[in-house]
Amino acid sequence: MRTLPHLAAAAALLLALAGCSSSMPAPTADQVVADLTSKISSVQPGEVVTAENDPNKLLGRPNGYTSAMAFTDSRVPTDPFPPAPGSIEAGGKVEVFESEDTAQARVEYIQQVTKGAPMLGEYIYRSGPVVVRVASGLTPDQAADFESALG
């Protein structure tokens, strides 16, 4: 008779722990960039995006990203014009959002904006609340490295 309450308490505890593990916090952009640099040898960390230097004015704002960071990729062609430091054209950018839905909305927005202007195109990958934007100067095979690294 005493084991039934103990089993119920143990089951409740296991369910609570299982619920906690599925709601792990999203990584920060610098953590994602560090992971990318460990998996893709041509990638180097770039500038951390702050509210002051954010060209998109999305950091910390409603439906914006919670963290963002640029990165460079040495495989990006620099002739005839070198890409501006910190720009996506120099390698890419990681944007982390509060939710998967907000990240997906960002992906769809970028795809819509660049759809009619191929020169603005970029590779874009999403995993959960993380969006990785990659320079269009890379070949499709090179850009696929980011998709693989993101998992």
Image (spheres, grey):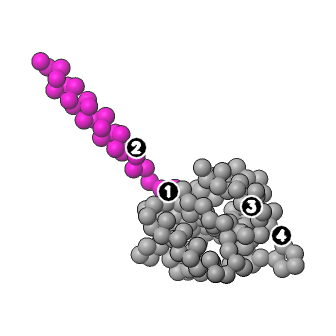
Instruction: Say which residue appears at 84% left-offset and 73% top-offset.
Output: 78
**Residue most extreme to the top:** 1
Residue 120 is left or right of residue 60, and the answer is: right
Label 3 environment density (alpha carbons within 10 Å; few <14, some 14–19, many ≥20): few
Residue bearing the label numbered 4: 77
Amino acid type indicated by mark 2: Ser
The answer to the question of whether label 4 and label 3 lie on touching residues, with beta carbons closer than 8 A, is no
Magenta residues? 1-27
Residue 77, image quadrant:
bottom right
Residue 88 is left or right of residue 15, and the answer is: right
Instruction: Say which residue appears at 77% left-offset and 65% top-offset.
Output: 138
- Element type at marker 4? loop
Which one is in front in this view, the residue at disc 3 or the one at disc 1? Answer: 3
Placement of 3 over or under 65, stated as above or below: above
Residue bearing the label numbered 1: 128
CA distance separating discs 1 and 2: 15 Å
Q: Earlier in the sequence, mark 1 or mark 4?
A: 4
Residue bearing the label numbered 2: 21
Q: Main secondary structure of the magenta part?
A: helix
Q: Any magenta on residue 50? A: no
The answer to the question of whether label 1 and label 2 lie on touching residues, with beta carbons closer than 8 A, is no
The answer to the question of whether label 3 and label 2 lie on touching residues, with beta carbons closer than 8 A, is no
Q: Earlier in the sequence, mark 3 or mark 2?
A: 2
Asked whether the viewer can see residue 96, the reply is yes
Which one is in front in this view, the residue at disc 4 or the one at disc 3? Answer: 3
Amino acid type indicated by mark 3: Pro
Label 1 environment density (alpha carbons within 10 Å; few <14, some 14–19, many ≥20): some
Which one is in front in this view, the residue at disc 2 or the one at disc 4? Answer: 4
Q: Earlier in the sequence, mark 2 or mark 4?
A: 2
- Element type at marker 1? loop
- Element type at marker 2? helix
Amino acid type indicated by mark 4: Pro
